[in-house]
C-alpha cells in the first residue's frame, strides 16, 4: 500500500505540473489572440490611454517578455507558496483563497453529507421494495430532482419566501466564519448547502438501488440467508457493504466538483466562496486568480481520487494494491 501511495503522489505531482502548463497556455497564449492585452483593459477602465502605465503594469504583474520566461517565473512563485496578486484588487491571491476555500468546501461537504444520509437509506428501501409503491415513489422523486435544477429552486425559495412570507435568507455582513459565530454562520450557509446536495442525492439514490438489487441476487447473499442470519444482518453486513464501492467512488469524485460548482449558489446567496471568485475573475481576465483557482481545484480532484482508492480495501478485503 505504501508503495502504491508514493507512486500515486508522484503521478499527482506530474498531473499538477501538466495543469499549470495547460492553464498558462490557455490564458497567456490563446486568450491574448482573441482579447486585447489585459494591461490595456485595466488602464482603459479608468478612461486613459497611457502606454507608459501599460508597460509598468506588464512589468509589475509579469506579463512582459518571453512566454517561457513568464511561465518559469510563475512556476517559481508557486513553488515558494506565492500565488501572486489580483490584477484588479491588488490583494494576494493566497489570502483570498484562504478566506474563500473553507466556504466552498463547507458548502460541498454539507450538501454531499445530506445527500448521502438521505439517498443511501432510501436507495436500500427502494431495492427491498422493488416494484412496489415505495420503489415507484422514490424513483419518481429521484427523476424529479434530476429534472429540477437546485439553483432554480433557490431562486423560487427566495422569491416566493419574500413575497408570501416576508422571509429572506440571512445575509450577515461581514460574513462570519464558523469559528467566529457558529450559529450565524450555519443560518447563512445551511439552506444553500442543502440545495447543493439535491442533485447528487437523486443520482446516489438510483445508484444505491441498482447496486443493492445486483448484490441481493448474488450467491453469497443466498448462502448467508440459508445459514439463518437475520435479514437485517444480511443487508447491513453483507449487501450494503459491497454496494457502497461505486457510491464511494461517486462521493469522492463529486466533492471537488461541488466545491468548484457552487458558483451559482454563492452568487444567489452572496456567499464569499471560490466559485464566485473564479467566475468574477474569468469575466475580468484576472490571470493570477484564474491560474491559482484552477490549480487548487486540480489538487482537490487528485486528492479525492487518491482518497477513494485508499478506501476501497477498507470496504472490500479482496482488493489489494501492490
Image: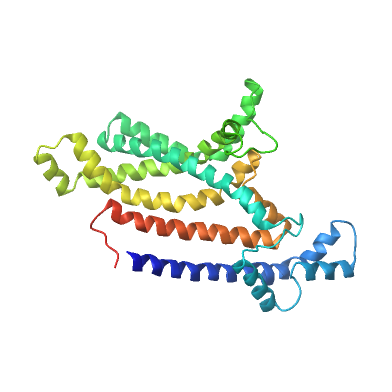
Relative image position of residue 317 (x, y in whole percent): 24, 55
Relative image position of residue 45 (x, y in whole percent): 84, 56
Q: Residue at x 50, y 56 (%)?
A: 300
Relative image position of residue 178 (x, y in whole percent): 57, 38
The N terminus is located in which quarter?
bottom left
**Vertical side of 299 occupied by 158: above or below:** above
Rendering quarter of residue 41: bottom right
* Residue reaching furthest to the top: 165
**Vertical side of 96 occupied by 79: above or below:** below
**Vertical side of 141 occupied by 293: above or below:** below
Work out whether residue 208 can be spotted. Answer: yes
| Left or right side of 295 for 218 | left
Work out whether residue 275 can be spotted. Answer: no
Q: Nearer the viewer, residue 55 or 120?
A: 55
Rendering quarter of residue 225: top left
The C terminus is located in which quarter?
bottom left
| Left or right side of 139 for 42 | right
Q: Nearer the viewer, residue 40 or 303?
A: 303
Q: Residue at x 65, y 44 (%)?
A: 272
Q: Nearer the viewer, residue 147 or 107?
A: 107
**Vertical side of 48 occupied by 66: above or below:** below
Amino acid at each position: 500500500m505504501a508503495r502504491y501511495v508514493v507512486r500515486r503522489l508522484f503521478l499527482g505531482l506530474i498531473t499538477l505540473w501538466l495543469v499549470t502548463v495547460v492553464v498558462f497556455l490557455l490564458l497567456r497564449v490563446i486568450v491574448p489572440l482573441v482579447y486585447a492585452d489585459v494591461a490595456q483593459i485595466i488602464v482603459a477602465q479608468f478612461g486613459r490611454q497611457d502606454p507608459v502605465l501599460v508597460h509598468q503594469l506588464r512589468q509589475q504583474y509579469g506579463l512582459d517578455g518571453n512566454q517561457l520566461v513568464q511561465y518559469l517565473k510563475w512556476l517559481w512563485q508557486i513553488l515558494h507558496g506565492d500565488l501572486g496578486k489580483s490584477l484588479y484588487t491588488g490583494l494576494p491571491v493566497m489570502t483570498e483563497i484562504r478566506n474563500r476555500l473553507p466556504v466552498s468546501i463547507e458548502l460541498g461537504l454539507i450538501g454531499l453529507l445530506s445527500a448521502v444520509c438521505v439517498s443511501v437509506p432510501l436507495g436500500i428501501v427502494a431495492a427491498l421494495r422493488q416494484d412496489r409503491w415505495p420503489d415507484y415513489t422514490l424513483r419518481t422523486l429521484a427523476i424529479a430532482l434530476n429534472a429540477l435544477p437546485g439553483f432554480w429552486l433557490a431562486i423560487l425559495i427566495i422569491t416566493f419566501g419574500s413575497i408570501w412570507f416576508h422571509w429572506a435568507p440571512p445575509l450577515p455582513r461581514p460574513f462570519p466564519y464558523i469559528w467566529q459565530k457558529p450559529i450565524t454562520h450555519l443560518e447563512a450557509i445551511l439552506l444553500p448547502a442543502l440545495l447543493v446536495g439535491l442533485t447528487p442525492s437523486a443520482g446516489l439514490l438510483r445508484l444505491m438501488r441498482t447496486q443493492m438489487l445486483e448484490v441481493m441476487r448474488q450467491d453469497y447473499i443466498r448462502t448467508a440467508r440459508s445459514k439463518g442470519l437475520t435479514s437485517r444482518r444480511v443487508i447491513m453486513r453483507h449487501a450494503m457493504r459491497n454496494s457502497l464501492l461505486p457510491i464511494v467512488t461517486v462521493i469522492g469524485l463529486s466533492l471537488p466538483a461541488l466545491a468548484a460548482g457552487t458558483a451559482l449558489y454563492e452568487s444567489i446567496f452572496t456567499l464569499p466562496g471560490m466559485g464566485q471568485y473564479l467566475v468574477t475573475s474569468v469575466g475580468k481576465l484576472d490571470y493570477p486568480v484564474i491560474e491559482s483557482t484552477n490549480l487548487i481545484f486540480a489538487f482537490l480532484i487528485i486528492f479525492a481520487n487518491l482518497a477513494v482508492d485508499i478506501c476501497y480495501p477498507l470496504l472490500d478485503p479482496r482488493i489489494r494494491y501492490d
